[in-house]
Image (tube, grey):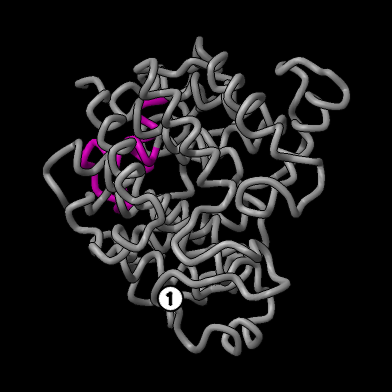
Amino acid sequence: MTDTLQDRAQGAILGAFIGDALGLGPHWYYDLQELRTDYGEWIDDYTDPKPGRYHDGLHAGQLSQSGYILSLLIASLNKYGSYNQHDFCRRLDEELFPQLDGTPISGPGQYTSQSIREAWRRRTIAGADWQNSSSHADTTEAIERTLALGVRYATRPAEMAEAVAANTTLTQSDDTVVSMTVAFNALLGLLVQGQAFTADISAKLMQLVKQGNLPFHAVTSDNLQPPKPGDSDPPRAGRFASPDALLTPSYMATAAFDKGIKIEPAWKVSLVYGMPCAIYHQLPAAYYLAARFHDDFESAVLHAINGGGQNQARAILTGALVGAQVGLSKIPERFIQGLDNAKALLDMATQLANNIPKA
């Protein structure tokens, strides 16, 4: 693991961009034989989308709309030094939405996700304000952009939770999705700080709850032991009814390191936890890969991609988590150089990393 917070922060951001671009070509193949026919037995680099597939017309190394929106949020963070929701919403209204038409195959990246399409409809067609723009999409779309907030506020978990929850509810209203999005970013923040992704990581997250830094309800004592007789609910019940989203990473790390549990090859994690888009399929797979390949960025993102299905989101999440562990300095140079507009993306990540306050 790298010793420099800035290196880890840069690694998380570039890791997410790399995961996004790696998924551009082989995105959403649910028939693994078709995926292998089109791209061979093992995808090991950026690829062009095939004609008639998602993102048709783009080229290897370019970003999808997820990467584009992530870059909008980073640009806003870099301009103001902290999260400015008004400015981010303005960027969506002025820079993204004019490029959309409400259909899936439109806009930057040649595909617009469900929650963004619904926000576009509510803002552009119905004239709703941003407090009434969200929908019930149960995907990782918010994580794919708010990971920038997880990095920026890595040393300030309470501020992170507030910013991530506010940003998530711009497009996704389901409280469980919001809690899982905050939990991912809480984990990412610990990794950027230099914590190891091991089986005790959830205990560290729960300690933040006990300290009042994460808004999750918890009645158990330390190490998930029962409350003592006479204990009452904590004075801060928390926004989220359950802390379970914070517990998932430790179970996935336990599975990754338990010699009695074998997922071989590792890309088959997509078959174990599911290939679809929903957040409850995506997070366990990303957590497993990020713990198992905590020191091997290339293996982590390539197994995420070669598992098919919603492999782009899986690779974005895995890339951010492993990038935070190895740092930019340990990401293979070919992945960085192969990114379209690599210098600008690297500059954005560097500025963001330099804005992280000391703990």
Residue name at image x 74 percent, y 40 percent: 100
Residue name at image x 41 percent, y 55 percent: 340
Q: Position of residue 33 (x, y in %)?
A: 63, 88
Q: Is residue 135 left or right of residue 58?
A: right
Is residue 254 shown above or below 169? below
Is residue 289 shown above or below 118? below
Q: Position of residue 352 (x, y in %)?
A: 31, 30
Residue name at image x 60 percent, y 81 percent: 35
**Residue bearing mark 1:** 266
Please indicate, yes or no, whether residue 294 appears anywhere in the rendered image.
Answer: yes
Q: Position of residue 316 (x, y in %)?
A: 47, 53
In the rendered image, residue 65 lying in the magenta stretch gets the answer no
Q: Amino acid at mark 1?
A: Ala
Is residue 62 shown above or below 236? below
- Asked where in the image residue 207 lies, by quadrant, the reply is top left
- Asked where in the image residue 25 lies, by quadrant, the reply is bottom right
Tell which of 15 and 215 is nearer to you: 15
In the rendered image, residue 197 lying in the magenta stretch gets the answer yes
Q: Main secondary structure of the magenta part?
A: helix
Q: Is residue 61 left or right of residue 241?
A: left
Looking at the rendering, the stretch of residues picked out in magenta corresponds to: 187-209
Q: How many marks?
A: 1
Q: Position of residue 306 (x, y in %)?
A: 50, 75
Disc 1 is placed on an element classified as: helix
